[in-house]
Amino acid sequence: MDENKPVTQKQLSAALDSQKTEILDAVGGMLREALHDTETKLLKAFFQYQEIANIRLHKLTTDVSNVDTSSDLRLNNLEQRIVQIEKRIMMP
């Protein structure tokens, strides 16, 4: 194309539309890639948080289980003492 030759409005419009399409495609690709990277980072962060939460939950469950076992042992001990006291009271 001769640079000194005047262009028509139709030619200018076509050239601008072509450039506009190229720019939009490039920006769209960059945005898709950035969005994908952001999603990946978020998923990794949530996965790490989930692993930590699972560890804490497991520890808490274990602690509650230990407390429950300890409480059962204490209750059994108290029941035995009460039975012994009742036997003493009932025996003349």
Image (cartoon, rainbow, N blue to C red):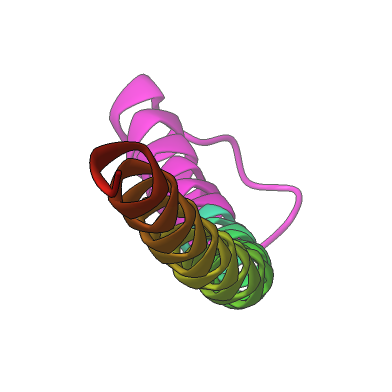
Residue 45 location (% of width, % of height): 67, 65
Quadrant of the image containing the N terminus:
bottom right
Front-most of 22 and 5?
22
Taking the magenta stretch, the answer to whether it contains residue 21 is yes
Q: Which residue is drawn at 60% across and 59% down?
A: 42
Percent position of residue 39, x then y: 51, 61
- Residue located at (63% from left, 77% from top): 55
The majority secondary structure of the magenta stretch comes to helix
Q: Where is residue 86 in the image (x, y as percent from the top left)?
A: 31, 43
Residue drawn at x 50%, y 64% is 77
Side (left or right) of 36 relative to 21: right
Residue 74 lies, with reference to residue 89, above or below; the image says: below
| Residue at 40% from the left image edge and 49% from the top image edge | 88
Residue 91, horizontal then vertical, whole percent: 28, 49
* 73, 30: nearer the viewer: 73
Residue 52 in view, yes or no: yes
Does 15 appear above or below 60? Answer: above
- The question of residue 56 being in magenta is answered with no
Q: Give the range drawn in magenta.
A: 1-30
Q: In this view, does 42 lie to the left or right of 84?
A: right
Work out which quarter of the rendered image holds the C terminus and state it: top left
